[in-house]
Structures are given as structure tokens and as C-alpha cells.
Amino acid sequence: EVTKLNRYAAQFRFLQAKQLFTTDDLDTALHSMQNSINAMKASAGEKQSRIKELDELLRMAQYYVDGKPVADKLRSIRFEKSRQKYNDDSLRRFYMAERKLKPHFKDGKLPITAWRRERERLEQEYKDIQTELLPLYADVKKLWAIHYSIYEVQHEQERQNATIRQKKQEIEL
């Protein structure tokens, strides 16, 4: 009983600090917080998917850079026997990267530095969103606990009222 009272007192202080005085205020706060969490999660998801995209582009660029000397050497060889020894994974990755990176070439160069900068910026923005989300999650968790406590009390009162009504009906009969 004492622990319940302490829990209710802590919840009451939390509600006062948030200036939530009615169940409608509580519901409104819960829904607005949930909406802002959903918007932040969507934004974080977009940033995360773009980061993965950039990681893939950077990986392809590395394959391209690693395989370019081998491909250039292979193009200069005229005899078939000499060319056969260059059929390795780095060459396959080079051609794959060349195909995938073809639309990204600007004036014969890849914007690798711009991709790295964009990735760093997105990574920082993603971390900032995560930092903002942590206290929101904690508050929403507390508000849902309070909401559940209120529901428990209301349910118990309704059950008691139903029992009292039933006893009155029995007495009247």
C-alpha cells in the first residue's frame, strides 16, 4: 500500500510538472508526444536509409578505385594468354562498380568527398534525433503508466458501483 501511494505521489508530481490536470489533458499530451515521436522516427528512418545508400556508393567507389589500375593494365594487353591471369575478383568488382556508378560521374570524376560530407552530416543529424527521442520516450512511458493507473482506478470504481447497484436491486426485490 505504501509503495502504491509513493508511486501515485510520484505520478501526481510528474503530472503537475507537465501541467496535466485532467484525463483529457493527459490523452492530448500522449497523442501529441506520440505524433512527434513518429515524425522524428520517420525523419531518422529517411536519414538512415540515405546513409546506407551513401555507404553503398562509397563501397562501389572503393571497388572502382581498387580495380582501375588492373582494368587499365588489362586494356593495354593484346595477347589472350596474358589477359587470362587478370580475371579475378577485383576486376569483376571494378566492372560492377563502373556500371553502378556510371550515372554519378561528373566531368569524369566521382563526388566522393561530397558523399562523405553528406554522410557525416546525416550521421550527426541522426544522432541528434536519437538524443531528442530518449527523453520523449521516457516521458511517454511515464504517461502511459499513469494512464494505465487511472484506467485501473476507473475500472475498480465501475466494478464497485456495479456491485452496489446489484445489491440495491436485490434489496428492492
Image (cartoon, rainbow, N blue to C red):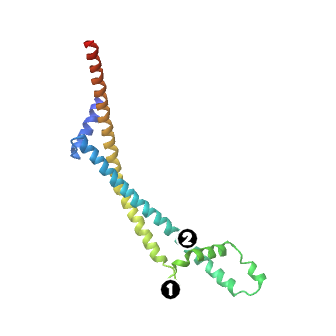
Quadrant of the snapshot with the N terminus: top left
Q: Position of residue 73 (x, y in %)?
A: 67, 84
Q: Position of residue 137 (x, y in %)?
A: 35, 49
- State the separation of the CA atoms marked 1 and 2: 20 Å
Vertical side of 75 occupied by 133: above or below: above
Q: Does the image show residue 14? A: no
- What residue sits 36% from the left and 57% below the top? 39
- What residue sits 44% from the left and 69% below the top? 119
- Residue at far front of view: 173
Disc 1 target residue = 107
Of badges 1 and 2, nearer the viewer stands 1
Q: Is residue 83 left or right of residue 31?
A: right
Picture quarter containing residue 47?
bottom left
Q: Does the image show residue 19? A: yes
N-term mark: 1 or 2: 2
Disc 2 target residue = 59
Q: Secondary structure at mark 2?
A: helix
- What residue sits 46% from the left and 73% below the top? 116
* Label 1 crowd (10 A; few <14 / some 14-19 / many >=20): few
Q: Position of residue 30 (x, y in %)?
A: 30, 47
Q: Amino acid at mark 2?
A: Arg
Total numbered badges shown on the rendered structure: 2
Q: Secondary structure at mark 1?
A: loop
Vertical side of 17 occupied by 90: above or below: below
Q: Amino acid at mark 1?
A: Asp
User: Which is nearer the eye, 113 or 100?
Assistant: 100
- What residue sits 36% from the left and 52% below the top? 134
* Label 2 crowd (10 A; few <14 / some 14-19 / many >=20): few
In the rendering, which numbered label is found on residue 157?
Answer: none
Vertical side of 49 occupied by 113: above or below: below
User: Which is nearer the eye, 17 or 150?
Assistant: 150
